[in-house]
Image (tube, rainbow, N blue to C red):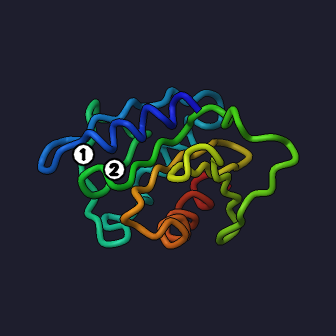
Amino acid sequence: MKQGVAVLALLLLAGCGSAVQVEPPVPEGDAVAACTRLSPLLPATLDGAERTTSTPESPYVAVWGSAEIALRCGVPRPARMAATDQLAELDGVGWFADPTVPTLFTAVTSTAYVEVTIARTHEATGVLMELSGPVKKATG
């Protein structure tokens, strides 16, 4: 939860035309390889927003637009996710929607958790659908 709020705050404070500051995660175990595979599979454009750079640069972070969409691969399991929570399945990937941060979603896979923060100016389901294919391919 703490990390998601930090990413959300950075998204809200980011300015146009410069690298977006996003704290990169530190994946462990199988997540390292999965997240390394994910980076080149991610789209150059996502829901009309162009992929841009983040600072510090990290293979585990991807940002689109003026911090409108941010992805962090290899984050810890969401603290608020209970074993009984149902996940929204999109293209074979289960997504956990944080009930306290409506713009924060986490892909739950057997090898890595992939956190995505989506500004309300974008349609979350469409963004998650576009990301599900690359996430499934990298973590499967």
Examine the rendered structure and indicate whether residue 78 appears above or below residue 28. Answer: below
Do the CB atoms of the residues marked 1 and 2 lie less than 8 Å apart? yes
Disc 1 secondary structure class: loop
Q: Nearer the viewer, residue 140 or 131?
A: 131
Residue at 46% x, 50% y is 117
Numbered badge on residue 63: 2
Q: Quadrant of the N terminus?
A: top right
Examine the rendered structure and indicate whether residue 44 appears above or below residue 32. Answer: below
**C-alpha span from label 1 to label 2:** 6 Å
**Which amino acid, mark 2?**
Val
Residue 123: x %, y % from top left: 46, 70
Q: Quadrant of residue 43?
A: bottom left
Q: Image check: 11 left or right of 76? A: left
Q: Earlier in the sequence, mark 1 or mark 2?
A: 1
**Which amino acid, mark 1?**
Thr
Q: Nearer the viewer, residue 128 or 2?
A: 2
Mark 1 Cα within 10 Å, few/some/many (few <14, many 20+)?
A: some
Examine the rendered structure and indicate whether residue 47 appears above or below residue 73. Answer: below
Residue 77: x %, y % from top left: 68, 35
Furthest-front residue in this view: 100
Q: Nearer the viewer, residue 19 or 6?
A: 6
Q: Quadrant of residue 55?
A: top left
Residue 61: x %, y % from top left: 40, 42
Q: Quadrant of the C terminus?
A: bottom right
Disc 2 secondary structure class: strand
Furthest-left residue in this view: 17
Residue at 67% x, 52% y is 96
The residue that mark 1 highlights is 53
Residue 120: x %, y % from top left: 41, 61
